[in-house]
Amino acid sequence: MIDDRNPYRLLPKVDELLEDEKIGELLDSTPRRIVVESIREELDILRGDIKALSLNEEQILDRKYGLVKSIIDRTHRKHAPKLRRVVNATGTVIHTNIGRSLIGERVMDNIRDISMNYSNLEYDLDMGTRGSRYSHLEDILVEITGGEAAMVVNNNAAAVMLVLSTLARDMEVIVSRGELIEIGGSFRVPDVMEQSGARLVAVGTTNKTHLEDFQRAITEETRALLKVHTSNYRILGFTSAVSAGELSQLSREYGIPLIEDLGSGVLIDLSKYGLEYEPTVQDSIDSGVDIVTFSGDKLLGGPQAGIIVGKRKYIEDMKKNPLTRAFRVDKFTISALEATLRLYLDEPTAIEEIPTLKMLAMNMDEIGEKAQKLYDILIDGVGDRGLNLDMVEDYSQVGGGSLPLEKLPTKCIRISSDSISISELEKGLRQAEIPIIARVYRDELYMDLRTIMEGEYEIIMKGLQYSLSKIGGAIL
Ligand SMILES: *Cc1c(COP(=O)(O)O)cnc(C)c1O
């Protein structure tokens, strides 16, 4: 017996929905089980609402009308890859949470060419015998940095560990207390050092360390002096640190190698482009440091990697350390890093083609033009939807624990509203098909044009429309 007043009778069956034309199209590109799951879940939601909200027949038919679209949206969300592209509207150029450095067109071409074909990754084309995967990067790193030899591992943390393990396992390494840093993700330099098997001897105080502190701590067991670039913070005021040059003299006097963890690894003097001066890898080598380590994906603007350059005799020992096999880089990294380093052979090309450098060097005129374009598109697309939009001057950040005090003048689109919750708007942007990551400050939303790319204006407009449609019911 069918109860005419049973509201659930108005809902379609799963099989009926699978016959729908639009859902049929969906089945061409999506596994059936995911579509069926989405149909069940959307029907469950509707049943729940019928009960909880006591929907009447008219309201149910209304919802049924939008059912196929909800199923399609849900399927797209479910079937979307977990690791997804986002729009960086934060203005932080080297943002570790959303991918650090971007790869440019020419570098991508090289990755594609190498990874879609076989390559001489570990093959010596002259000899016709086995070769070394490290050889491809060594010459160019030597040429750019002025070091004698070079090698590359998976990231800078691995590089520091490999260096210490090779030079000072079960022995002592002297480091200033002012440089025992944490680098994010609760990752601490002293912990990495201890994992390497080296014994840490901290000297000096938080704000001041002198050359004599190092000298007095040298014993028979000392195998290295270590300098760590305090990339992500600065101690200001009554301070002193021992320079690489001074330490290098001491290291030569005692025949103990000097290691420097530079962190960011900048290869170009960025002060020419309006940034604070940051010691380059070349400066470090020039001041007599024996082994320098740095990241591939911070200021260098390449793939994730840990680069080690310096004296050949130490680097040859590192290549033989079993940790090298555990930290070894794959062909994606090698092809990306080699192509990135080649761009550095001509500085203007590097600034133009390495996205990280291009964004850092971008001037106010360029950013202002971008802001005007995005502003016009947004006014067109969402100008009448209860949002106040304007263009304001603000500051971008370098990020990635690099140049922490640097404030780069920039332009932002600022969005406020008297009727719409800005935190809901921000949340909706994060849930858009291509999520948009923006900053909220004092109940206003900021989108910084330094890190937004030209092709992303429409995506942002659509993201805002999506967010507004989601919070349609959440009017204050
Ligand atoms: C970022 C950083 C590291 C870690 O480098 P990863 O490439 O992220 O592993 C180590 N030391 C310093 C000083 C850093 O700034």
Image: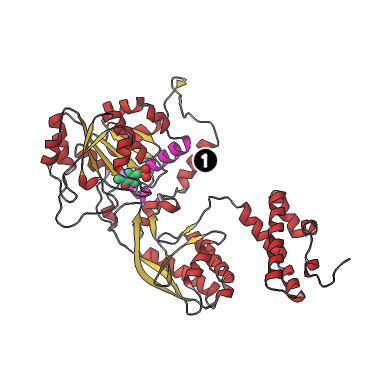
Q: Quick check: 11 left or right of 421?
A: right
SS for dot 1: helix
> In the rendered image of this protein, does residue 398 appear above or below residue 191?
below
* Region of the chain picked out in magenta, as a range: 327-353
Q: Is mark 1 within 8 Å of ligand 1?
A: no
Residue at 43% across / 35% down in the picture?
Answer: 329
Residue at 49% across / 61% down in the picture?
Answer: 436
Q: Which residue, given by chain and number where applicable, does mark 1 sit on?
A: 112
Q: Quick check: 475 left or right of 314?
A: right
Residue extending farthest to the bottom is: 418
Near-viewer residue (313 or 321): 321
Q: Can residue 249 be seen by looking at this rendering?
A: no
Near-viewer residue (267 or 100): 100
| Amino acid at the residue labelled 1 | Arg
Q: Can residue 273 be seen by looking at this rendering?
A: yes
Near-viewer residue (257 or 45): 45
Q: Position of residue 351 (x, y in %)?
A: 36, 51
Quadrant of the image containing the N terminus: bottom right
Residue at 55% across / 34% down in the picture?
Answer: 117
Ligand 1: give its quadrant: top left
What colour scheme has been applied to the protein in the rendered image? secondary structure
Q: Position of residue 361 (x, y in %)?
A: 34, 56
Does the magenta portion include 333? yes
Q: Around disc 1, counting alpha carbons within 10 Å, would you say few (fewer than 14), some (14 to 19), or many (20 or more)?
A: some
Displayed quadrant of residue 432: bottom right
Q: Quick check: 128 left or right of 306?
A: right
Residue at 68% across / 58% down in the picture?
Answer: 41
The total of numbered circles placed on residues is 1
Displayed quadrant of residue 35: bottom right
Q: Position of residue 298 (x, y in %)?
A: 36, 48
Q: Quick check: 441 left or right of 285?
A: right
